[in-house]
Amino acid sequence: MLPPRLNDGGRTDLDLATLRRATFGLKLGAGVTLISLAIVEKLANPEMARAMLEQEPLLNLLAPFGVSADAFAVVAGSVELLLGLLVISGALPQVVAILTAVPFTATLALFGATEFLGHLPLYGVLLSFLVLGSLEETSHSLSGLRRRAGVPTH
């Protein structure tokens, strides 16, 4: 989606049309991945989620409040589904990137380097959302919004 130049080490110039296509693909890929994992690992397969929570009971952060493993799997799956939809929407990219990173980073204490390596692509996507959403000239491409004619850019 962002074709590299043959010189300059493969760097590319980011015109807004190309950036819009690239960020759409990035949002769609990351969001669909989060949604599918929420459905496959938690919502549609409660036995799998229950087995993981029995193996690692510390994952159920709501257990001290009396929330069962099955109920926590539904809550966790719903949150992951919501985060996937928010990623696809492109709304508030910096906030969504930080919120999405929290649960994926929290599990590092339990699962260590394997979890970090598995989540590394997601961290890269979230970092790009954070950076692109922070720049005025690229935030519109990330959110899918188009600038209105006559509106100052500063």
Image: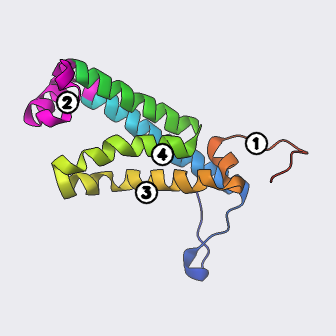
Locate residue 83: give its quadrant: top left
The local secondary structure at tag 3 comes to helix
> In the picture provided, is 52 more to the left or to the right than 76?
left
Task: For residue 44, say whether it is visible.
Answer: no
Quote the CA–CA distance across marks 1 and 4: 21 Å
Q: Earlier in the sequence, mark 4 or mark 3?
A: 4
The percent coordinates of residue 52 (x first, y second) are 14, 33
Q: Earlier in the sequence, mark 4 or mark 2?
A: 2
Above or below — where is 43 with respect to 5?
Answer: above
Considering the whole magenta stretch, tell me its main secondary structure: helix
Neighbour tally class for label 4: few under 14, some 14-19, many 20 plus, Cα within 10 Å: many
Q: Residue at x 59, y 61 (%)?
A: 2
CA gap between label 1 and label 3 equals: 25 Å
Instruction: Mark yes or no: residue 102 visible.
Output: yes
* Residue at 17% in and 24% down: 64
Q: Which mark is residue 60?
A: 2
Read off the residue under disc 3: 124
Kind of residue at badge 4: Ala
Residue at the far right: name it.
150
* Residue, disc 4: 97
* Residue 18: mark: none
Q: Which quadrant does the C terminus fall into?
A: bottom right
Q: Give the x, y percent position of residue 51.
A: 11, 29
Q: Read off the residue under disc 1.
A: 146
Q: Earlier in the sequence, mark 2 or mark 3?
A: 2
As shown in the figure, which amino acid type bears the numbered disc 2?
Asn
The answer for how far apart the CA atoms under marks 4 and 3 are is: 10 Å
Q: Which residues are magenta?
A: 42-70
Tag 1–tag 4 contact (CB < 8 Å): no
